[in-house]
Amino acid sequence: MNADKKSFEIKIRVPFFDLDPMQIVWHGNYLNYFEMARAALFDHNGIDLYSYYDRHQLIFPIIRTSTKHIFPLRYRDEIICKATLIDAHVKLVVDFEIRRVADGKICARGRTEQVTVKTPEMETLFSVPQEIRSALGY
C-alpha cells in the first residue's frame, strides 16, 4: 500500500468468475478493479462519497472511462491496481495501472472522470467541493 496522498495500490487475485470464454479476464471487469482501487484511494484519504451524499445531497457520477488493454489477465494472476489522482478541481480525474505481481508486467492502464451533481435538481457543478479537494491535497 502506498502512503502517498495522491496514489494508492491494492492487491487482487483474479477470481474464476471474472473470466470470459477465452479464459482471460473479461474486458468490463477491469473497471471493477479500477473502482476498487479508486474507492481505496478515497478511503485512504478519509473520503466516503456515499455518506457525503447523505450530508450534502451531492453525487459524483462517472462521466468518462477509458481502458487500454495491454496484456491479458488470467485466472489466479496476482495483480496490483494503482489509482493515482490527477485532478480534483473541476472534476475528479483518476488514472489507473494494473500490473502483475510475478513479473511487474503492465497489463492495463485506464482513467475515470467524475463530476459533482446536486440532487434532486441533477445540476452539474463545475467544481469539486472544497472539503473533498482539501482531503485530497488540492
Image (cartoon, rainbow, N blue to C red):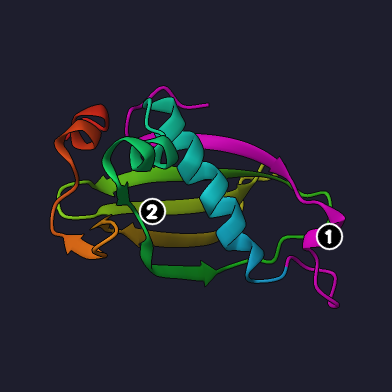
The disc label shown at residue 52, or none: none
**Left or right of 95 on screen, residue 104:** right
Please provide the residue range marked out in magenta.
1-25
Quarter of the rendering containing residue 13: top right
Q: Secondary structure at mark 2?
A: strand
Any part of residue 106 in sight? no
Identity of the residue drawn at 27% across and 58% down: 115
Q: From the top left corner, tell me how far across and down residue 96 is, in percent.
A: 45, 52
Identity of the residue drawn at 77% across and 61% down: 18
Q: Secondary structure at mark 1?
A: helix
For marks 2 and 1, the one nearer the N-term is 1
Front disc: 2 or 1: 1
Q: Residue furthest top?
A: 3
**Left or right of 7 on screen, residue 58:** left
Quadrant housing the C terminus: top left
Q: Nearer the viewer, residue 101 or 35?
A: 35
Q: Residues within 10 Å of mark 1 (few under 14, many from 20)?
A: few
Identity of the residue drawn at 71% across and 70% down: 26
Identity of the residue drawn at 53% across and 51% down: 35
Q: Residue furthest bottom?
A: 21
The disc label shown at residue 17, or none: 1
Quarter of the rendering containing residue 64: bottom left
Q: Which residue has dot 2 on it?
A: 95
Q: CA separation, marks 2 and 1?
A: 25 Å
Q: Nearer the viewer, residue 62 or 24?
A: 62
Q: From the top left corner, tell me how far across and down residue 36 is, in percent.
A: 56, 45
Q: Residues within 10 Å of mark 2 (few under 14, many from 20)?
A: many
